[in-house]
């Protein structure tokens, strides 16, 4: 089967826009440090030191989802400000949450 192809020239125009702000004016977070944590009936809300706010559904973390609200409030923020910890000697929860685990997918090195 033979097909014939005809080339058609169509004029194309490229629009260029002036860049309003240079790349240096934008903020790109380099690290995630925990500033504050609070809970409601369905989420753990984490405010980071750079102003980002993250809400994680409690059902993603079974130990928190199944815990009493007053037990969830007995957390500590790690010295590095990257983890939320519950000490089983101080409350009914024995868990730790790394905030980086909830900021997006982790690239595997396969």
Image (cartoon, grey):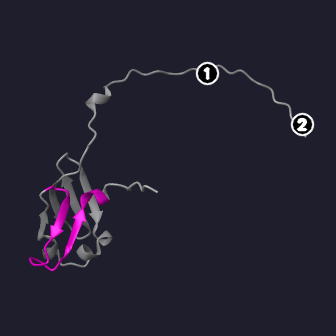
**Left or right: 90 as drawn, with respect to 98:** left
Asked if 73 appears above or below 14 in the picture, the reply is below
The image quadrant that residue 76 belongs to is: bottom left
Measured from the top left, where is residue 20 in percent x and y?
A: 33, 24
What crowding class fits label 2: few (fewer than 14 Cα within 10 Å), some (14-19), or many (20 or more)?
few
The image quadrant that residue 91 belongs to is: bottom left
**Left or right: 100 as drawn, with respect to 106:** left
Res. 101 mark = none
- Judging depth in this view, the residue of 83 and 25 nearest the camera is 83
Say which residue label 2 marks. 2
Segment colored magenta: 80-101
Measured from the top left, where is residue 100 in percent x and y?
A: 28, 56
Measured from the top left, where is residue 55 in percent x and y?
A: 27, 59
Secondary structure beneath disc 1?
loop
Q: Which of marks 2 and 1 is nearer the N terminus?
A: 2
Secondary structure beneath disc 2?
loop
Q: Distance between the residues labelled 2 and 1?
A: 30 Å
Q: Does the magenta stretch include residue 106?
A: no
Say which residue label 1 marks. 12
Measured from the top left, where is residue 3 in percent x and y?
A: 86, 35
């Amino acid at each position: 089967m033979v097909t014939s192809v005809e080339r058609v020239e169509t004029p194309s125009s490229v629009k260029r826009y002036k860049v309003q702000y240079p790349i240096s004016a934008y903020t790109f977070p380099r690290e995630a440090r925990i500033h504050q944590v609070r809970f409601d009936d369905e989420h753990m809300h984490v405010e980071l030191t750079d102003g980002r706010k993250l809400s994680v559904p409690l059902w993603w973390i079974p130990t928190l989802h199944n815990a009493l609200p007053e037990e969830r409030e007995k957390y500590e923020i790690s010295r590095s400000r990257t983890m939320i910890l519950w000490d089983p000697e101080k409350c009914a929860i024995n868990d730790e949450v790394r905030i980086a685990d909830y900021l997006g997918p982790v690239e595997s090195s396969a």
